[in-house]
Image (tube, grey):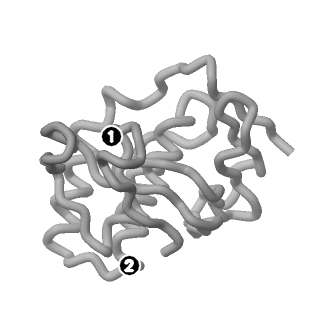
Amino acid sequence: MKYRELHPTKEGNRKWRYITTGVVKLRLLGDSTGHRDCKMFVNGKVVAEIKKGNLYVSKGYAWNGCSPKRYIGWHPVGMWVGTPDFKGSLAASLGHDVLFQFSALLEYNMNQVNTFFYYWMEIDGMDSALQDIYHGAVKSFGARFWGKKDPSLSVIYV
């Protein structure tokens, strides 16, 4: 995976835990491959795109891993508290984060995006019991984050 963990006190904003170090490609599945190709922007900068049934996340995209998670403490002492991240959940949390962020502007429904999350964890070898727990959590608690409009976000269909 092309990402690294941000230093919580030296690299500024503690809201984000990981950042991509290169373009990350995640395969979409099933009827999702029919989604129109598009580019996703934050404040005019491309952060991701959907192209030929794949989600590409740009270098420099920052996300928190699996939620909920908060940085508790102060400089130089502190720690992350919340949902643990595992090797098998990081790419899934990245793709899920991007698609939820742009959910008001994309043609996917929440069930499709949650299915992608499950699929990406499976591909990355997540323990099946944990995979079911994490998938259950996004199904149960994700609705409050779905479809939020943000004027800094835009999507251009190509």
- Kindly state the secondary structure of the residue where label 2 is placed: loop
- Kindly state the secondary structure of the residue where label 1 is placed: loop
Q: Residue at x 27, y 76 (%)?
A: 126
Which quadrant of the structure image shows residue 14? top left
Where is residue 98 shown, x and y percent of the image? 52, 46
Q: Which residue is mark 1?
A: 14
Q: Residue at x 25, y 70 (%)?
A: 86
Up/down of 115 relative to 9, above or below: below
Q: Residue at x 39, y 37 (%)?
A: 13
Front position among marks 1 and 2: 1
Where is residue 145 shown, x and y percent of the image? 37, 30
Question: Extreme bottom residue here?
Answer: 125
Q: Residue at x 34, y 55 (%)?
A: 7
Type of amino acid under label 2? Asp
Check the picture and name the quadrant holding the C terminus: top right
Q: Is residue 154 left or right of residue 78?
A: right
Up/down of 110 relative to 144, above or below: below
Whole-angstrom CA distance, mark 1 to mark 2, is 26 Å
Q: Answer yes or no: is residue 30 visible.
A: yes
| Number of the label disc, if any, that sits on residue 140 | none
| Label 2 neighbour load within 10 Å: few <14, some 14-19, many 20+ | some
Q: Which residue is mark 2?
A: 124
Q: Nearer the viewer, residue 33 or 95?
A: 95
Type of amino acid under label 1? Arg
Where is residue 130 shown, x and y percent of the image? 16, 68
